[in-house]
Amino acid sequence: MKTYQQFINGSLVNSHSSDWIEVENPYTGEIISRVPKGNDADAYESLEAAQKAQTAWAAKSAPERAGYLRQMAALIRANRIELARILAAEQAKILPLAQVEIDFTADYFEYYAGWARIYEGEIIQSDRFNENIFLFRKPIGVVVGICPWNFPFFVMARKVAPALLTGCTIVLKPSSLTPNTTFEFAKLVATLDLPKGVLNFVSGSGKTMGNTLVTSPITDMVTLTGSVEAGQEIIRASADNVTKVSLELGGKAPAIVFEDADLDIAVKGVVDSRVIFSGQVCNCAERAYVHKNIYDKFMDKFVKAMKDVKYGDPFADPAPAMSSQIDRAQQEKIDAMVIRAKAAGAEVLTGGKKADTATGYFYEPTVLVNCRQDMEIVQKEVFGPVIPILPFTEYEEAIALANDCEYGLTSSVFTKNINTTLQAIKDLKFGETYVNREHFEGMQGFHAGWRKSGVGGADGKHGLMEYLQSQVAYIQF
Ligand code: NAD
């Protein structure tokens, strides 16, 4: 069993607490590592280190800061196989997908390094003849990053890369379920000559240590990726200091399959979306609306494809399509939601129960019909390989059903008609819309949810802007 240390002020250090968080491999049930259950003293120390380092870090040129991001990318690439194996083990992510996440993360550091000479301020027209108005963009300061368990390595980079590139310093806390890859990265970062305090990794409970990080007056911005509940708690906790928050929260993405859709593309798009990482992806299709004229044909293909989904050991070669849920609690939560759906009238066409496997917390790929729009299974995030499918008759009906949701992260449409595509993009009230493909965003886009799915967003130019604040100078001559 591995024991990890926190990374504070440029060093791998022991925690002030003597408590530990044990990390379970969800597939084998084995305890594979332990990380410190950090306390307030760790939180303060890391924030003070980040605060002390920030002015000098911001004084370096952006290309110089970018150089460190490139070194981080190179370290990830040099250790890509080992990191993927650690990721696959800590969360039962099938190895090929874990490898994609590791490689994508290296690309992400390089992508943001490329922004060093690109982001800029503005010169604004003044009402006065002899005046220039300059809008400067300056780093926000000390950032607290809080990560979920589903893409722990990538989401870490999604916060660290833009923060460091813009001259912010950061204290990042991974999820207690999946801290291993973050602390492996910390060990790699410790070999660089990165100035002390610029990047800090701590571990601990969200509600205690996480709350201390959020409420500290040192913290200038909190970026959370996690559940709506955690987002709401962070909004409340950041109120006293009016700290900026950037929140990427849950989703309940609709997929709409129109009458003229290529059914094979639609079936593949929705199935891939639902079973990738065992259905534990915030932006993936969580409900589908299918036109009544193609409903039977679609369902034949769709149910067959869901029945054919292989699940098993994340390290198996060839890899199955999915593996275990993250833990027993998640498996139980999914099961309870399906049981309540059945009690409310839903019919199970395949799956509908925990899988009978020797190890792991598997849930069978599940298709539900006879669901009503107001049912919990249609309205609330399941975060498992379960999908309710509802028929629709009119375009307006499909759009209204899709939009009838407290979340607003992503959506998708399947159609060959460009007019239907453009009209749907206009009418859908979601931060992202995918057309004729699975739900998965690009690093140059902007991943930002509407309604309860979040505030602000990540990736691309607009994600970089989250870490910058403006200063406007009126210069009369
Ligand atoms: P979670 O909200 O339980 O935990 C996320 C992180 O927040 C953890 O590190 C946790 O310790 C911390 N935390 C919890 N309460 C806190 C508090 N009061 N103060 C400070 N920190 C706190 O989420 P999870 O179960 O790890 O992740 C799954 C959720 O994340 C799903 O709802 C999923 O949709 C969402 N998610 C969203 C995106 C996105 O980009 N929108 C991406 C991935 C996951």
Image (cartoon, rainbow, N blue to C red):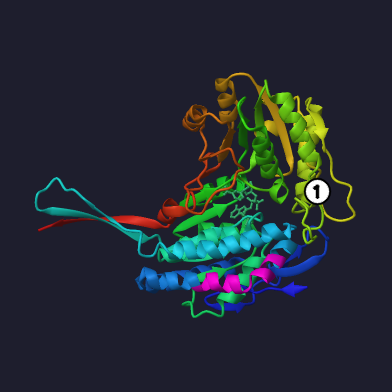
Q: Main secondary structure of the magenta part?
A: helix
Q: Nearer the viewer, residue 181 or 425?
A: 425
Residue at the image position 65 percent from the left and 48 percent from the top: 281
Q: Which kind of residue does numbered mark 1 sit on?
A: Lys
Image quarter hosting the N terminus: bottom right
Tell whether position 30 is magenta.
no
Question: Within the image, what quadrant is residue 148 found in?
Answer: bottom right
Quick one: SS at disc 1? Answer: loop
Q: Which residue is mark 1?
A: 310
> Is 94 drawn above or below residue 447 in the view shown?
below
Q: Residue 40, position in %: x, y?
A: 59, 66
Question: Within the image, what quadrant is residue 399 found in?
Answer: top right
Is residue 181 shown to the viewer in this render? yes
Image quarter hosting the C terminus: bottom left
Tell whether position 74 is magenta.
yes
Q: Nearer the viewer, residue 355 or 475?
A: 355
> Is 343 drawn above or below residue 71 in the view shown?
above
Is residue 241 shown to the viewer in this render? no
Q: Residue 58, position in %: x, y?
A: 38, 69
Instruction: Using residue 18 as the reference point, say whether residue 102 is left or right of it.
Output: left
